[in-house]
Amino acid sequence: MSGAPLAMKHADKLRRMVAGYPGPIRFATDLPGVKKQRGPRVLSVTSGKGGVGKSSVVVNLALALANEGERVLVLDADVGLGNIGILLGLRPTFTLDDVFDGTRRLGEIIVTGPGGIRIVPAGSGGQRGPGLGQRERLLLMDELDNLDEEFDVLIIDTESGISENVTYFNVAAQEIMVVLSPEPTSLADVYALIKVLTTRHGEKSFRILVNMVKDSDEGLDMFKKLSQVVSRFLDVSLDYFGCIVRDDRLIDAVRRQRAVVELHPRSPAASCFAKLARTLKSSPTPQPVKGNIQFLFRRYFEETHSMRYA
Ligand SMILES: Nc1ncnc2c1ncn2[C@@H]1O[C@H](COP(=O)(O)OP(=O)(O)O)[C@@H](O)[C@H]1O
Ligand SMILES: [Mg+2]
């Protein structure tokens, strides 16, 4: 595997940086010759600015995928402002703060939402402040790897803005879905986010979803506008994953703390989410290891590894 030496070097560097970390640290990238991914698909949902509908997309895409038979885990990585629980009317007893404090294991804080989707509730940041330190990041990765439950898809709801937390989760994810809205400011924010992710972190591929559109023409039009400016200045590839229409039924669902896919399954927005779930399922998964540390559940690699080398 040509990328392996670089990835291993990166793992060593991280290991040195977290010398004080108590748990066992092993990385998927440590395993030689492993090419096939059998673990969950890891998708981050991100947008630059807030209010474009990231969390709504995460919740409803998760449920639409569950309706297609996928086992879905949602990670609310919006530290401090996490609202997946609020959107679904859930009141989790524990959050990621308890995992970082060392009082709970990840498996103990996960709650169940509609359609059986499983959710990791965001912490408030507490005394640590909003950002996750290197220790928290590795602990989270280790806890995900050690979960007893199996998942087909992990969807990560990121914070707004371009903080280090946002870039971290996007780089750690296998695929990045950027949510755009028809507002001109959204185009500028998304461009800025893609620029940072490619120039500073080497990300080359982005899935684009346009939310709150009038109709599918408006979605395609926004995608074309973004493609034009991106292709002029950046060397990245954009894949159009479609659009979600602006729908009062979604606003009603938010008010009632339910997912629109569940509350109004025949609404236009719910159909868009069902279509998005099918698009995602039928699109190929990118290369599992991009050469950096990723949220891929190590266990699956070990299984693949032992099958290949047994
Ligand atoms: N497709 C849509 N149609 C109508 N309203 C929407 C749609 N998507 C999002 N909204 C509205 O935008 C608000 C903010 O969405 P949210 O998912 O919290 O955004 P973000 O997570 O990006 O900050 C929602 O509470 C909802 O009222
Ligand atoms: Mg949000």
Image (spheres, rainbow, N blue to C red):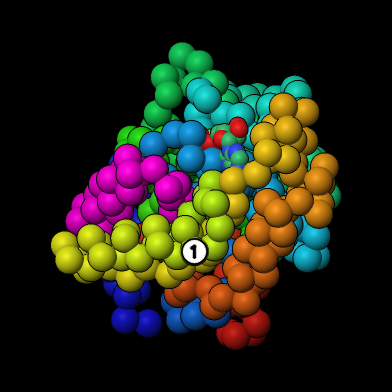
Residue 255 point in image, percent of width and height = 72, 27
The stretch of residues the image draws in magenta is 176-202
**Residue drawn 23% across the image and 68% down it:** 231
Return the residue at label 1.
217
Residue 179 within the segment the image draws in magenta: yes
Q: Residue at x 81, y 46 (%)?
A: 264
Query: Does residue 229 appear anywhere in the picture?
Result: yes
Residue 309 falls left or right of residue 235: right
Callout 1: few (<14), some (14-19), or many (20+) C-alpha neighbours within 10 Å? few
What percent of the width, then of the height, locates residue 259?
A: 74, 41
Q: Is residue 223 inside the magenta stretch?
A: no
Whole-percent x, y for residue 275 in the image: 67, 65
User: Residue at image x 47%, y 58%?
Assistant: 218
Viewer-closest of 27 and 175:
175
Viewer-side residue, 92 vs 188: 188
Q: Quadrant of the C terminus?
A: bottom right
Nearer to us in this view, 251 or 104: 251
Residue 190 vs residue 36, the one in the foreground = 190
User: Which quadrant contains ligand 1?
Assistant: top right
Give the residue type at disc 1.
Asp
Q: In which quarter of the image is residue 97?
A: top right
View extreme (left): residue? 233
Judged from this view, the residue extending furthest toward the top is 127
